[in-house]
Structures are given as C-alpha cells and as structure tokens.
Image: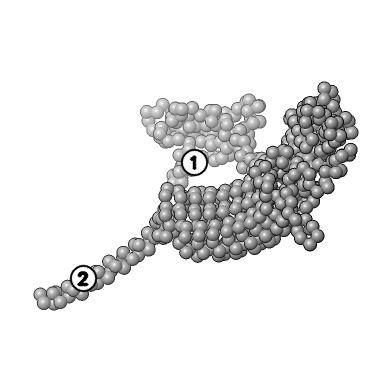
Amino acid sequence: MYLCYRSLPTKLAFLQTNCNSFLYVLLLFLSIFGGASGACPPACICASDIVSCTNKNLSMVPRTIFKFIRKLDLGYNKIGFLDPDWFPVLLDKLHTLILSNNAVSSISSGSFSTIPNVRYLDLSSNHLKSLSNPVFQELKMLEVLLLYNNQLTHIDAGAFGGLHKLQKLYLSRNSLSHFPLDLYIGRSKLTELVLLDLSHNNLQTVPVQQISLIPARQLSGIYLHENPFSCDCSLNSMLNFWYHRHFSPVVDFKNDYICLTLDGKTNSRLHLIQESFLNCSESAINGSFPAFGLLYEVQVGERLVVHCDSKIIDTSTQFVWVNPEEQTLKPDYKNGHFRVFYNGSLEIEDAQIGDSGVYSCIAINEKRSLNETIDIRITVSNMTNSRSHAHEAFNTAFTTLAACVVSIVLVLLYLYLTPCRCWCKSKKQKRKPNQSSVHSSILSATPSHDPQEDKKCSTGKRVVFLEPVKETDSGQNGKVRLIPSDNLTAESILKTSSRSKSDSDSVSSVFSDGPFIASV
C-alpha cells in the first residue's frame, strides 16, 4: 500500500508529460494540415475569400494561407525580394495580389509560378529600379499591373512578354526617359493594352511618327502629362489632334502638358495643347498643315467609318479624301464601296484586303484661306487566314501522327483479331440446345458428299471413329454396342486416361482422317 502511494505522483507526472507532448504534436499537426486547408494566419484578418495582412512588419508570406482565397493584401510590409520560393503554396484561385508599399527591389524569373491566375497585381510604391527580360511571363491571365511610384529607369524590351491579356499598365511617377514603344510594335507587343500611364516621368521627346501608327483603340489611352517635354511642333500637332479627337488623356489633363523652351538664359514653360504654338501654325497659311492621324483596323467584309478630325472645321469647311490609289473621293460621289459624307467622314462598305493603305483627308476652309491634311492608315486583315496559317504546321503534324496511329491499330487488328475458322463456325451452326444424348455426341463415320462443305471444313478437322463391339451377353438380340454406357459421350472417351486394354484396342483411330473398316 505504501509503495503504491509513493508511485502514484510519479505516474501522474508521467501522464502529464505525455499529455503535453501529445497536445504539442496535435497543435503542430493542425497548424500544418489545418492551416493549408483554411486556417487564417495569426497576423492577418480573414473574411470569406479575402485575406488582409497589411502593416504587420512581414518580411515573408505567412506559411498558413487559405488555399481558396481570391484576394490577398500584403501591403505596407517589409517584403524585399521576389524569387521562385517567396510564395509558399500554390494558389490557383488567387486573382488579386497587393504588394504595395513594401521594400521590393528585385524580381526574379519564376517568382509568380505559384499564382498563375492572378489578374490584378499591385507592385506600386516599392524600390524597383529596372525590369529584366522576362519577369511576368507566368501571369498569363494578368489584366492590370500597377508599377507606379517606383524608381524605374530602364525596362527591357521583353519585360512584359507573354502578358497577352494585359489591359492596363501604370508606370507613372518613375524615372523613365524613353517611351516603351515595344509595347505596341514588335514581337512582344500587347494587343489588348488600352491604358498606358507614363505621366510624371523624365520623358523629353517621344517618337511621334511611330506613335501615329498605333491603333486608335490603344492610342486613346496613353497618358503623357507632367513630363519635361522639349517644345516641338510635331508633338504639339499630335497632342492637338488627340484633343480634337476627345481623347481622355489630353482632355482631362490639358493644362498639365507643359514643354520647356530656351529663351535667352532662362527656360520658359509653354502649354503644348494650344492652336497658336510658337511658329508651327504659320505653315498652315496657304499651304498644307501636316497632322498625325490614326491607325484603324478592320476585318474583311466589315463596315468602317473614319472621321476627319480637322482643327479648321466650321460651316464653310469642305472635305476631300484621297485613297491609296490616288483616287479623289468627294461628297455625293460614290466610288465603288467608298462614300464621303458632308461632315468629312469616310465610309468603307465591305472592306477588302486591297483597301489597306494610307488615306488622306484634306479639309479646305476658303474663308480662312487654310487647308489641313490628315493622314490615316487603314489596315484590313483576314482573321480566318491568319489563324489558318498560324495553325498550319500543327495541323500537318497532327494529321501525320493520326495516320501513324491508325496504321498501327489496323496492323494489330490484323495480327490478333483474325476471323473465326470455318470448323468453329460449322460447329456452332450444328450444335443445338439439347445435345446431351449419346447419339448427338457420336460423329458419323459416313463421309460427307457435299463438295463445298468438304472444301471449307477439311482444314484442321479431326474425327473420332469407334469400333463397334458385338454384345455377347444374352438378351441383346445381336445388337451392336457402341459404348459401354448411355451416359458416356465421345468427349469423355477422348479425355479419359485410364482405359481398359480392350477399350483401347477397340479404338482403331484417334484424330485420324483415314477410313474406318469394321471387322465382323
């Protein structure tokens, strides 16, 4: 009794230690597996499919993250580098990722491989200085990319390669000194990009001639205000054209387009969007004022209406169009599928490939003795042909592979699935449901006289001939006994290995095609 009392505290302490260890293991198990399935990280706030981890001094992404989240906010933290291991788990449902106001200074290739379906990525207000080629290629579904308020001075030509669905790109408040023309022209162009914000950078000049070749759908979303432009007539002409075309970037920020001109020893600031800009307007008097138009794209068979956005339009302005074949098109005169309206618009019905080229709209104002020429480029493409050429190589390879597979299948069918032999078919035809008697099991010794049947069924056929045995016992009236028992069949005779000597001697031929002669 005393020993039991003394050992009781020891046992209790042992049980308590084991319980604590078990609880620790259980909590660790739940933190690993339970967190992966849906535990909210301790430093974050979770609401349905949204996880907010803002302003928590995080230097890395929490390891326990909802796998089914759609929006993750990691703003105002201390995340510094984005490499292939910076994101712990695969989140295929995540479509919004916010990393603004962190310390991100570099992005490596493969950094976004675990979040391939992100559509909105915010990397604003970080320490990025350059973008290498390529860094966003895993984000095939990305539509909006925010990179404003960084320290970007250089962007590689293919830094945004692979972002075929990107629609909005914000690069404002950086230190860029060159217009990223590769976004619109070249192998890595983004055809879906409709908004590019380059405001508040260090752009002094832009390639006006190349920009004029950008399609109108994309051209109307380029923001260039608050840049230290040098005063230039071509830039003034382009911006004035955008303003008369009611493009939002110049209409909304008209007073923010400023250029610097050297006036003696001081720099003067002038508004770029104005009619009387330096001496640029003097060339319009009794001459032709060059204006930069738009690039219109249309498919074969579609209808296109092109407007002539002239700066000298009033009630007395007349319009004349010149097509790529140098034909003059005037109002009230329909030339083929071309038609010019009195307001200066050109209509092309049932556009064809041959209609592609540069069209010139000439606006004539006799009261002001001015005329203005606007060149507009129209491109007519055939989407069906372009797609067929793009997939021609794939179709050829697929057809060849399919032919090889079909050939292999036919060879296998020929080798292993040969037709049933004639003896098998004849046996099935002759076999009837109730053939359990002795007489149905005994094959007749009389040869068949049907020549066609002999020809078809002679190959591989084996017949069992049994020698008749006379019944010596009394009471049988001299009848011939073919087999000892009525329940014994021909198959049982062939399969039985233990026979009497008399029975084995009575069999004159087994599996023999030779004739049988019965002895009397």
Q: Position of residue 50 (x, y in %)?
A: 46, 50
Locate residue 65 relative to residue 338 in the image: left or right.
Answer: left
Q: Quadrant of residue 296?
A: top right
Q: Secondary structure at mark 2?
A: helix
Q: Residue at x 42, y 48 (%)?
A: 48
Decide which of 315, 98 is in the foreground and name it.
315
Numbered tag placed on residue 141 in the rendering: none
Q: Tell me, yes or no, if residue 382 can be seen here.
A: no
- Can residue 271 be seen in the rendering of this structure? yes
Q: Where is residue 237 shown, x and y percent of the image?
A: 78, 44
- Relative depth, front residue between 316 and 15: 316
Q: Is residue 40 above or below residue 358?
A: below
Q: For mark 1, what is the residue?
A: 494
Between disc 2 and disc 1, whose residue precedes? 2
Which residue: 61% across, 33% down? 422
Q: Decide: few, some or many residues near mark 2? Use Cα within 10 Å; few <14, some 14-19, many ≥20.
A: few
Please give the name of the residue rendered at 73% of the width and 38% of the height, measured from the top-left corner.
Answer: 244
Observer-side mark, 2 or 1, equals: 2
Q: Secondary structure at mark 1?
A: helix
Marks 2/1: CA–CA distance: 81 Å
Specify the farthest residue to the left.
Answer: 1
Q: How is the image coloured?
A: one colour
> Is 518 placed left or right of 222 in the picture?
left
Give the percent coordinates (x, y) of residue 35: 41, 57
In percent of width and height, residue 433 lies at 46, 27
Reading the image, the residue beneath label 2 is 12
* Residue nearest the observer in this picture, 400 or 321: 321
Please report the residue visible at 67 percent of the width from the left and 49 percent of the height from the top: 256
